[in-house]
Amino acid sequence: MIIYTAHVPKRRLVAAGAAALCCIFAVLAFTLTLGGRAVAVSAEVKHVKTNDDRLAYLSGLGWQVSPQPIATEELLIPEEFDDSYQGYLALQKDQGFDLTQYKGKRVKRYTYQLTNYPTQAEPVQIALLIYKNKVVGGQIQSSSGSFVHGLTLPDPSEGESSQPSANVSPAPSAATSGQVL
């Protein structure tokens, strides 16, 4: 029988214990953040190739939508953004999407009718911007254009503060293929 012994200074044991605790706290914080609303959408959603993939993505966000898109449009992200895009770009950036990476690129916008929007007094739509099978942006808006906000499900317990922003202009609608966003 062979027995190995090692002498480890207390400093190293304490340092190893502290490092282990830090790792545990980091994993817990990450897990709690994912369980909350902080990470409801992600710019890293890839492999969204089919309608079923888009429906699964929206379902994962807590949304129930029409089974088929009510509109599918090809949009051109402009090379230069003027001041009218600043609110829309900020809305996308708040969700973890950076449309400035896609300047001059063509994206597809798939718009669905939402069926489970809280306090749905008027028709509400949800749109996803897809570039090369990757979700690169999106928004929720009323059919009348009275509000626009990000893809996360509003928390009814937050009251009026969770109401969508009315000062963000939605991306312009595209009646024809190739329309500039």
Image: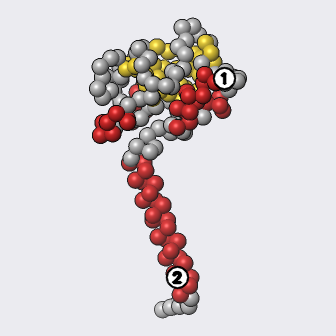
Which amino acid does the dot numbered 2 rest on? Leu
Q: Identify residue type, mark 1.
A: Asp
Q: Position of residue 45 (x, y in %)?
A: 52, 36
**Residue that appears at 40% across and 43% down:** 37
Instruction: Check the image and tell me how it is coloured.
Output: secondary structure
Please give the name of the residue rendered at 60% of the width and 28% of the height, measured from the top-left corner: 86
Secondary structure of the residue carrying numbered label 1: loop
The x, y position of residue 68, in whole percent, is 40, 17
Front one among 110 and 121:
121
How many numbered marks does the figure carry? Answer: 2
Choose mark 1 or mark 2, whichever is in front. 1
Task: Where is residue 96? Give x, y as percent.
Answer: 54, 39
Q: Residues within 10 Å of mark 1 (few under 14, many from 20)?
A: few
Residue 143, compared with residue 103, is above or below; it is above
Q: Secondary structure at mark 2?
A: helix
Q: Is residue 6 above or below residue 118?
A: below
In the image, taking residue 56 as reference, residue 2 lies left or right, namely: right
Residue at 52% x, 82% y is: 13
Instruction: Tell me if 20 is positioned left or right of 64 in this view.
Output: right
Q: Quadrant of the C terminus?
A: top right
Residue 82 marker: 1
Against 42, residue 85 (above or below) is above
- Which quadrant holds residue 124? top left
Whether residue 8 can be seen here: no
Badge 2, how many Cα within 10 Å: few under 14, some, many 20+?
A: few
Q: Earlier in the sequence, mark 1 or mark 2?
A: 2
Residue at 43%, 50% (x, y): give it: 33
Residue behind mark 2: 13
